[in-house]
Amino acid sequence: MTSHPADNDRPDPSNRLPGQRFDDHHHSAPRAAATGDPRLGNGAHRPASNRLPGQRNRLPGERHAGSPSVTCAAERENALRDASEELRRILPRRDVLALYRLRTLAERHLLTLNEVVVLIELLVRRHPLDGAALAETVGLGTGGITRLLARLEERDLVVRDPDPEDGRRLLASVSDEGRELLSDDLLGTDATELFAVVATERIGWVTSFLGRLTDLEIRRSRMEQDRRARRRQGRRRQRAYRDRPAHRSGWPHRNG
C-alpha cells in the first residue's frame, strides 16, 4: 500500500508525553490537554507568538509577582524598618558604654571628663587646634578652655605653640606623654578579636561601615554644637541689648 506523503509528517504516537494529544489540523504543533503534563498544560506554556516583549514562560509552581522595582522598594522599606528598631536598642547602649569608658579612663589618670575629651580630640586630629575650636568641642567658654589647657600643659600632656599665621593665637596639640597615656586605652583595639565573626571578604566592608557610622555621629555632634553656639550668641545679644546705656530721651528704658 502506498503511503500518503502527509502520513510521513505525522508524529509517532509513541513519542507523546502523558496526556498529550496531536492536533489533526496541525500535525507538527503538539498541544497539551487541560489536565495534561504540568510542564506544558494549565497555561504554563505560551507559544512564542503570543508572548509580550520581554515576557517569559513561568516555571512550574511560580506565581505572578509584581513589578521588580516595587518589590525591591517594599523589601528595602521592611529591612530599614527592622534596622531602625535594632539601632534604637543598640546605639543608646553603645553611647552609655562609651561614657562609662571615658569616666573610667578619667579616674585612672586623675583627669576630669572634659580634660579626657580634649585630649582625645587632639589625639585623633591631624593638626593642632586653637582654644575656640576646643571650646566648641566640650561646650566650654573661652575662659574655661584656657584654664583646662593650662592644667593639661602643667602635666606635660599638651603643648601650646604660637600660630604661625597669627601670633596672637595659641595652637594646642597633644604631647608625646599625652599620646602615650591614651594610646593603649584608645588605639589598642585587637582587630583579631573584633573581626573574629566576620568573613575575610567582609572585613573591608565592616571597616568602611564603621567609618561611615562615625562620620554620621560627628556630623550630628557638630550640628548640636552649632545649635548651642547659636543659643549662646542669642543670649549674649539679649544681654548686650538689655545692658546698653539709655538714650537721652530715655529709650529703651523709658516708660510708656
Image (tube, helix red, strand yellow):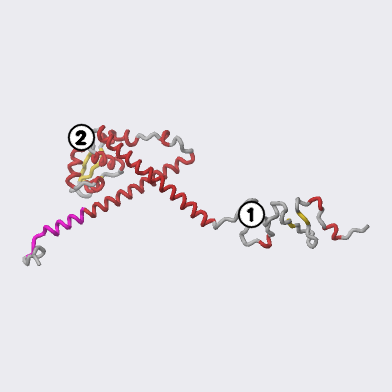
**Left or right of 35, for residue 161:** left
Q: Quadrant of the C terminus?
A: bottom left
- The residue at the far right in this view is 1
- Residue closest to the far front: 35
Give the extent of the magenta segment.
232-247
The local secondary structure at tag 1 comes to loop
Choose mark 1 or mark 2, whichever is in front: 1
Secondary structure, magenta segment, majority class: helix
Q: Nearer the viewer, residue 126 or 240?
A: 240
Residue 58: mark: 1
The spot of residue 197 in percent (x, y) is 46, 36
Q: Amino acid at mark 2?
A: Arg
Quick one: label 1 or label 2, which is nearer the N terminus?
1
Distance from Cα at disc 1 to Cα at disc 2:
76 Å
Q: At x 21% / y 53%, what residue is drawn? A: 232
Q: Position of residue 193 (x, y in %)?
A: 42, 33
Q: Which residue is mark 2?
A: 155
Q: Is residue 206 left or right of residue 43?
A: left
- Relative to 66, 241 lies left or right: left
